[in-house]
Image (tube, rainbow, N blue to C red):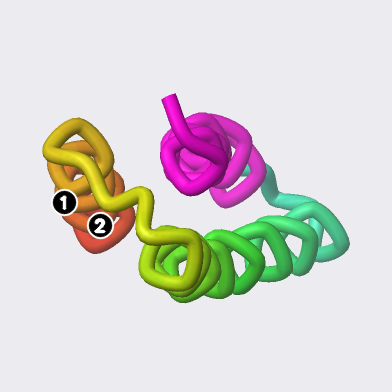
């Protein structure tokens, strides 16, 4: 697996704490959830950029990226 694929996996893993923190009724945890969501969005750009720059685009990476995007949108 490439570095870009690991970044995509990180984005998928971030979904779980985002969901957990969103449903807490403590405002600071909701803010932390927003920060994690923004970070996940930044990694969406970053993994594509790294894959293109290092010419390590793979079918697995494309599939994981699509899955991560869909999960974040459903979130």
User: For this view, does 40 lie left or right of residue 59?
Assistant: right
Name the outermost residue toward the front.
55
Residue 17 visible to an observer of this rendering:
yes
> What is the magenta range?
1-22
The image position of residue 23, as x and y in percent, is: 55, 44
- Vertical order, 42 against 69 (above or below): below
Magenta stretch secondary structure, dominant: helix
Name the outermost residue toward the right.
28
Contact check, label 2 and label 1, Cβ < 8 Å: yes
**Which residue is at a point 27% across and 52% down the rendered structure image?**
57
The image position of residue 2, as x and y in percent, is: 47, 35
Residue sitting nearer the eye, 53 or 22:
53
Answer with the quarter of the image where residue 73 lies: bottom left
Residue sitting nearer the eye, 70 or 24:
70
Q: Which residue is mark 1?
A: 66
User: Was residue 21 drawn as part of the magenta stretch in this picture?
Assistant: yes
Crowding near pointer 2: few (<14 within 10 Å), some, many (20+)? some
Cα gap from disc 2 to disc 1, whole angstroms: 5 Å
**Which residue is at a point 65% across and 66% down the rendered structure image?**
39
Answer with the quarter of the image where residue 28 lies: bottom right
């Amino acid at each position: 697996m490439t570095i870009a694929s690991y970044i995509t996996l990180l984005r998928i893993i971030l979904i779980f704490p985002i969901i957990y923190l969103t449903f807490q009724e403590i405002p600071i945890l909701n803010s932390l959830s927003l920060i994690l969501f923004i970070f996940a969005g930044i990694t969406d750009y970053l993994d594509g950029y790294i894959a293109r720059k290092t010419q390590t685009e793979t079918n697995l990476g494309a599939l994981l990226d699509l899955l991560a995007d869909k999960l974040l949108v459903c979130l």
